[in-house]
Image: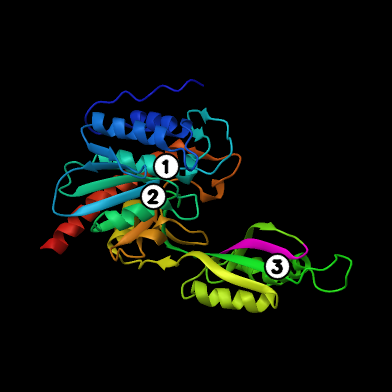
C-alpha cells in the first residue's frame, strides 16, 4: 500500500489526520540507531502545526506546545527492535514493526500534545532514541540535560484502559569462567562445562517463576562464548524493588561456584509509583470518562520510567494504547479504535493535569 504523507496545517489534528499520521510513523523504519528519518519527519510536522521543535545532540526530537508556569512531559521512544513486519493499513488496524512498541503511544502523545496549546500548561513531547538498547541513551540524555518537569507520562503500551504504575529493574551481569589450561583429554574441570552447569542452576533458581512474576527475580541468558579453558556470557536479570545489582552479583557468584567471576555491567532499579499520584489519577479519571473500567499494571519488563525516576522525583506514570502482548512479535499491530481512544484519554489527562498543577501552584 502506498503511504501518503500527512498534509498539515496549524491546529489540532482531526481523527482522520491522526490515523494518517500513525500509519506514516509506522511505515518509516526506525530500528535502534537509525531513527533520524522518523525524527526529522516528526520535527517537520510539529513545526508546520505551529509548535516549537528541534532535534538534540543524540537524536531525540523535542516538541513544545503551549505556555504556562508548569511543564508536563510526554516521552516515548522512536526506535524499534529489528525484524520486518509487513506494513498494512486497513479500516481497523495498522500493522508493522513498532506499531505497538511504541509508535502507537508515541504518535498518540504527539497528537494530544499538538492539541493542548490552550491548556495553560507547557507540554513538552519527546521522542527518544535507543530505548530498545541496553543503555537507553536517549532517555539518559534527557534525564541529565533537561530540567525536571512538573509531571511525566511515559509512552508504552498499557492498553487504552490501563495505566502502568511499576516496572522491574534491569541488572546486566558479565560472567567469566577460567580453568588452568591442559590437554582437553586430561581429567579435570573445563570452563565450558563449569559455566553450563552453573547456568542450569541459575535458570532453575530464577527463570522459571521470575520472568512471570513482578516480585521475583527473572533471568535471561543474552549471549555467550564457550571454550574449554575460558568461557563467558552476559546475563540480564529483571529485578523487583529492593534487589540491588551488587547483592545480586554476589548471589549469582555463589550459585556458579569456583572458577567464575561475576561483575555488574549496567543496572537500573525497579520503579513503582503511587496510585494516588497526579499522573496516575489523571489518566485513571480520563479512562473512566471514556466509559472503561481503569486498570493498573505492574510489568516485568523495563521502560524509560525506570531511567527518568533515577533522579526525577516528580509525579509519573506510563500509558499508551496497544496490546503489549504484541510487543516485538512477527504480527505486531494496533487497532485504530484503540489508538483513537488513547488519544482522547491523553487529551483528557492533560486537561486534568493542567488543572491539578494550577491548584498546586496556588
**Do the residues bearing badges 1 and 2 touch, measured as CB atoms within 8 Å?**
yes
Residue 170 makes an appearance in the image: no
Image location of residue 244, percent across then percent down = 48, 74
- Residue 128 horizontal side relative to residue 181, left or right: left
Name the residue that disc number 2 marks.
138
Name the residue that disc number 1 marks.
78
CA gap between label 1 and label 3 equals 35 Å
| Residue at disc 2, secondary structure | helix
The crowding category of the residue bearing disc 1, from other C-alpha atoms within 10 Å (few below 14, some 14 to 19, many at least 20), is many
Q: Which residues are magenta?
A: 228-237
Residue 28 makes an appearance in the image: yes
Image location of residue 174, percent across then percent down = 59, 65
Q: In the rendered image of this protein, does residue 253 appear above or below residue 163?
A: below
Rendered residue at 28%/51% (across/down): 73
Q: Quadrant of the C terminus?
A: bottom left
Classify residue 62 by image quadrant.
Answer: top left
Name the residue that disc number 3 marks.
199
Color encoding of the figure? rainbow
The first of marks 1 and 2 along the sequence is: 1
Amino acid at each position: 500500500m502506498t503511504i501518503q504523507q500527512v498534509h498539515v496545517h496549524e491546529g489540532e489534528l482531526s481523527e482522520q489526520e491522526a490515523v494518517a499520521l500513525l500509519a506514516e510513523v509506522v511505515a518509516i523504519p526506525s530500528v535502534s540507531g537509525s531513527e533520524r528519518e522518523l525524527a526529522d519527519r516528526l520535527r517537520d510536522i510539529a513545526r508546520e502545526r505551529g509548535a516549537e521543535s528541534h532535534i538534540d545532540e543524540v537524536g531525540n526530537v523535542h516538541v513544545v506546545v503551549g505556555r504556562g508556569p508548569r511543564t508536563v512531559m510526554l516521552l516515548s521512544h522512536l526506535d524499534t527492535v529489528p525484524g520486518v513486519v509487513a506494513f498494512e493499513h486497513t479500516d481497523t488496524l495498522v500493522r508493522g514493526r513498532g506499531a505497538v512498541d511504541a509508535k502507537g503511544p508515541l504518535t498518540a502523545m504527539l497528537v494530544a500534545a499538538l492539541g493542548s496549546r490552550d491548556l495553560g500548561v507547557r507540554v513538552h513531547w519527546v521522542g527518544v532514541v535507543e530505548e530498545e538498547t541496553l543503555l537507553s541513551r536517549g532517555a539518559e540524555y534527557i534525564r541529565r540535560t533537561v530540567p525536571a518537569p512538573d509531571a511525566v507520562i511515559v509512552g508504552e503500551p498499557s492498553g487504552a484502559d490501563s495505566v502502568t504504575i511499576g516496572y522491574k529493574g534491569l541488572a546486566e551481569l558479565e560472567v567469566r569462567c577460567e580453568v588452568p589450561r591442559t590437554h582437553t583429554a586430561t581429567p579435570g574441570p573445563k570452563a565450558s562445562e563449569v559455566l553450563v552447569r552453573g547456568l542450569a542452576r541459575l535458570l532453575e533458581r530464577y527463570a522459571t517463576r521470575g520472568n512471570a512474576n513482578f516480585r521475583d527475580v527473572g533471568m535471561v541468558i543474552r549471549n555467550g562464548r564457550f571454550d574449554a579453558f575460558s568461557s563467558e556470557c552476559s546475563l540480564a536479570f529483571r529485578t523487583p524493588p529492593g534487589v540491588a545489582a551488587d547483592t545480586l552479583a554476589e548471589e549469582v557468584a555463589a550459585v556458579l561456584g569456583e572458577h567464575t567471576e561475576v561483575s555488574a555491567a549496567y543496572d537500573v532499579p525497579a520503579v513503582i509509583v503511587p496510585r494516588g499520584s497526579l499522573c496516575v489519577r489523571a489518566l485513571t479519571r480520563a479512562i473512566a470518562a471514556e466509559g472503561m473500567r481503569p486498570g493498573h499494571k505492574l510489568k516485568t519488563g523495563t521502560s524509560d520510567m525506570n531511567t527518568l525516576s533515577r533522579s526525577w522525583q516528580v509525579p509519573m506514570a506510563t500509558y499508551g494504547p496497544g496490546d503489549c502482548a504484541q510487543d516485538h512479535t512477527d504480527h505486531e499491530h494496533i487497532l485504530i479504535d484503540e489508538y483513537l481512544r488513547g488519544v482522547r484519554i491523553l487529551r483528557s489527562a492533560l486537561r486534568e493535569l493542567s488543572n491539578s498543577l494550577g491548584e498546586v501552584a496556588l
